[in-house]
Image (tube, rainbow, N blue to C red):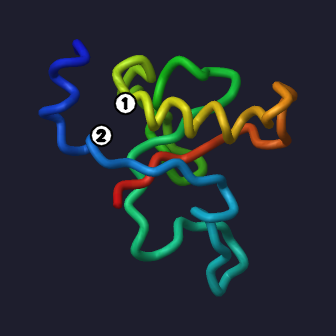
């Protein structure tokens, strides 16, 4: 998919980058689930940082959603800011989530 097509794809047009603590919560059975009211488009793992993967519940297969190169420059910079601090050292985050506003 070229960068011209991404502008027309409404799913990826206005996404925000959040850490896992802002996306996950525990339910009444003490299991992890996505917070209610948040629409997660995908996740970017530090080990597979060139692609956006589908964020599923545990036990489900992960699917390819989009190439990170096709995201907007603002979104790519937010992803880099989550993985690295201002001095260029790695933070403790391994996964960031793309959330639709």
Vertical position of residue 95 compared to residue 1: above or below: below
Residue bearing mark 2: 12
Q: Residue furthest top?
A: 2
User: Looking at the image, which is closer to me, 22 or 62?
Assistant: 22
The 10 Å Cα crowd at callout 1, few under 14, some 14 to 19, many 20 or more, is some
The 10 Å Cα crowd at callout 2, few under 14, some 14 to 19, many 20 or more, is many
Vertical position of residue 93 compared to residue 65: above or below: below
- Residue displayed at 18% across by 43% down: 10
Q: Residue furthest bottom?
A: 28
User: Looking at the image, which is closer to me, 88 or 26?
Assistant: 88
1 or 2: mark nearer the eye:
1
User: Looking at the image, which is closer to me, 42 or 9?
Assistant: 9
Vertical position of residue 19 compared to residue 28: above or below: above
* Image position, residue 58 (x, y; %): 60, 51
- Residue displayed at 53% across by 53% down: 57
Quarter of the figure that contains the N terminus:
top left
* Image position, residue 65 (x, y; %): 36, 30
Residue bearing mark 1: 72
Report whether 44 appears left or right of 28.
Answer: left
- Residue displayed at 37% across by 28% down: 71
How many labels were placed on the picture? 2
Report whether 30 appears left or right of 8.
Answer: right
Q: Quadrant of residue 82?
A: top right
């Amino acid at each position: 998919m070229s960068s011209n097509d991404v502008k027309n794809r409404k799913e990826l047009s206005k996404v925000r980058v959040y850490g896992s603590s802002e996306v996950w919560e525990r339910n009444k059975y003490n299991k992890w689930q996505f917070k209610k009211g948040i629409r997660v488009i995908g996740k970017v793992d530090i080990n597979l940082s060139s692609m956006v993967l589908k964020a599923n519940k545990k036990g489900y297969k992960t699917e390819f959603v989009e190439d990170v190169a096709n995201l907007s420059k603002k979104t790519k910079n937010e992803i880099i800011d989550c993985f690295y601090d201002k001095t260029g050292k790695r933070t403790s985050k391994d996964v960031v989530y793309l959330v639709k506003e």
